[in-house]
Image (tube, rainbow, N blue to C red):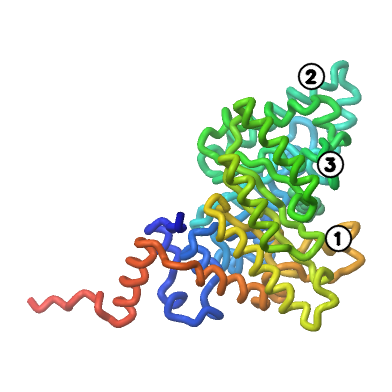
Amino acid sequence: MPRRPPLACVLVCVTLPALAAPASATTLRAAAALSGLHVGAATGQVELAAGAATLVAAEFGSVTAENDMKWSVLEPAPGVRDWSRADALVTFAEANGMRVRGHTLVWGRSNGPPSWLEASLAASPDPSLALEDLMLGHIAAVAGRYAGRIHSWDVVNEPLAFSSASYDTSSPYYRHLGPGFVADAFRAARAADPGAKLYLNEVGTETNPAKFEGLLTLLEGLLAEGVPIDGVGLQGHFLARPNRADLTARLQAIAALGLEVEITELDLPLVLFGARPDPLAAQAAAYADVFSACLAVAACRGITTWGVTDAGSWLDDEPFFRSFAPNRPLLFDEQGSPKPAREAVVAVLLAVPEPGPAASLALGLLALAAHGRLRRRPRTS
Ligand code: XIL
């Protein structure tokens, strides 16, 4: 099925200069709107306030909360909620007509759980019951607060072990609640925000076939149980150069389950291309491959880069990748200037065959306007 961007979006999001200009001057946001793909970036209130807001609003039609909606940020002390960063991000997105991906309601690693959680569970007479209450209360509070304003939630992030197909047995959720926590979380999220698309988000399945099989098995089990899940996020923190055919096949396998899919946390550090004569060009080609794979599968709805510019990539602080810093894994350089990868992505988005009828109409109207043919005639009397 060809992608059809909604007419309103085309008219509002695609500016005349973008269409009249060569591909290199077209904004990523305008190209994405024409292609029908949601293209976003992970960011947060601190980065936006520090000056990224203009670039983000100009170039992306979607934002993901990089950290601002994690439980550790939203509830820094037991029972003490701080909505300030998440509220500001949602307000920014709405003011700029952007969609919001909520990230993430249930994550057992890194800065997902609040620092007080383990001690609080240890002090409880029934840690399993305590965690169940906390998890369900957290989902109800957060998804409920933003109900109707979040396009899609990463309800459960990384339920599987980092590099195998089994559950992550070190996660507090798995340890205390067993595998059923995944289904419980999705049911609670649906109850709190019936309109949001509910995603399971996973790391490392793009380049690990065994783990990808484990993901499919998990999804089949959830679907068989009638769990309300709409989509799957493949994070896209590539540990090897992406293979376009493999990635396309994986996206198709998820689509075949009747689910939608997005690449939710894409970054491609330069170390993956270090041996190439022109690493930035090789990085651009790899970005183009990932976007082409998604565009080839109708169920693939969006791609989000994990960060805005190379100055703010999490990889430069990540234990493994920090030894390769600067990783320069994103579409914009440290100064916010477009990299070859951003140009390659725009070209791929603009090359989507056959704009649908809505896009054609919008292009036609805008072309007429460009020639001064839609101007109102001055009144003569
Ligand atoms: C990362 C953030 O980018 C960092 O700023 C933070 O210190 C740790 O978390 N997978 C995920 C994201 O799902 O939430 C992680 O984000 C990156 C890996």
Amino acid on which disc 1 is placed: Asp
Amino acid on which disc 2 is placed: Leu
Q: Residue 372 appears at what percent x and percent y?
A: 28, 81
Residue behind mark 1: 317
Q: Residue 308 appears at what percent x and percent y?
A: 68, 65
Tell me: is circle 1 under 8 Å from ligand 1: yes
- Residue at (85%, 39%) from the top-left corner? 115
With respect to residue 235, does 329 lie above or below? below
Amino acid on which disc 3 is placed: Ala
- Residue at (35%, 62%) from the top-left corner? 357
Indicate which disc residue 161 carries.
Answer: 3
Q: Residue 73 appears at what percent x and percent y?
A: 75, 44
Instruction: Judge by depth and name the residue closer to the eye, 100 or 251.
Output: 251
Badge 3 local density, few (<14 within 10 Å), some, or many (20+)?
Answer: some
On the picture, is 25 further left or further right than 104?
A: left
Residue most toward the top?
125
Inter-mark Cα distance, 3 to 1:
22 Å
Tag 2, which secondary structure? helix
Residue 350 visible here: yes
Indicate which disc residue 129 carries.
Answer: 2
